Amino acid sequence: MKNIVVLVSGGGTNLQALIDAQKAGKIKNGKITCVISSNPNAYALQRAEANGIDTAVIRRKDYAEFSEYSSALISLLNDKKADLIVLAGFMTILGEDVIKAFKNRIINIHPSLIPAFCGEGFYGLKVHECALQRGVKVTGATAHFVNEVCDGGPIILQKAVAIENGDTPEILQKRVMEQAEWKILPMAVALFCDDKIKVINDKTTEILD
C-alpha cells in the first residue's frame, strides 16, 4: 500500500475527488496518509481532517532562503514516508532539489491539454481565459509527472472537454474540473499505485496485465 501525500493551497476540490475515489475503492493500492498545505487557512485542510487524514502546514515565507524551504519540504515528505506526491492546487513552486528527490513520483493536474496553454504563468482562470481568447474548440486537463520544466513532465493521462458558445472563464473552469480534472487525477494516482506506469525517454507507457 503506497502512501499518498497531497499538497494543497486552497479549497481542495481535487483533493476531494481523490478522497471520494479512495472511498469508492478506485485507488486500491494507495492511501492518502497526509495533506500538506502552504496556507494554514486552506479549506482543503478541513476536508482532510473531516476524513481522518493527517495534516501539516509548511509556508515558504517562514524560511529565509528558498533552499532552506526545499530542504524542510523534503524532510517533511520523507517523515511522512511519501511514496507518491500529488499537487492539487499547490501554489508554491517546487525547487529542483525536491523534484530530483522524488523523480517521477510527483503528479500534477493542469487544466489544459498540454502543450497548449501551459508553462510559466498559466494557472487558474488564466488558462481558460487564454483558451477562450484563442478560440479553440476543445480544451481539457492533463495529469503529468513533474520535472524541472514547468508543466513539462511526462504526460500520464489527458481528457478533452468541449468549449461551448457563451462560455466564460469561470464556466469553462468548472466544466473542465467536473468533466476532466476530477476524473483523470484519481485515475493517474491509481495507475501509479498499481505500478502500471513506466517512463521511457520522458514518455509514459501504461503497463498492461
Image (cartoon, helix red, strand yellow):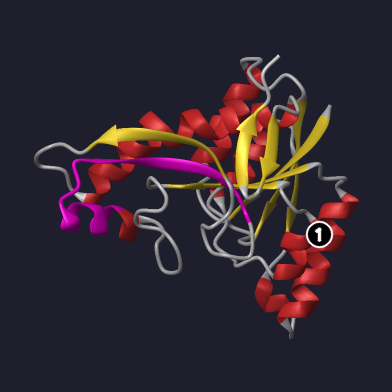
Q: In which quarter of the image is the C terminus?
A: top right
At x 66% / y 39%, what residue is drawn?
48
**Name of the residue lying farthest toward the bottom:** 64
Asked if the magenta segment contains residue 160, the reply would be no
At x 39% / y 37%, what residue is drawn?
177
- Percent across and percent down for residue 124 are 39, 56
Rendered view: 156 above or below 206: below
Rendered view: 93 above or below 112: below
Q: Horizontal placement of 83 versus 145: left or right?
A: right
Q: How many labels does the image show?
A: 1
Amino acid beneath label 1: Ala
| Nearest the eye: 198 or 22 | 198
- Percent across and percent down for residue 7 are 65, 51
- Percent across and percent down for residue 147 are 64, 59
At x 81% / y 32%, what residue is drawn?
2
Q: Horizontal placement of 83 versus 21: left or right?
A: right
Dot 1 falls on a residue whose secondary structure is: helix
Identify residue for label 1. Answer: 101
At x 74% / y 84%, what residue is drawn?
65
Q: What stretch is highlighted in magenta?
A: 128-146
Asked if the magenta segment contains residue 137, the reply would be yes
Local crowd size for mark 1, using a 10 Å CA cut-off: few (<14), some (14–19), many (≥20): few
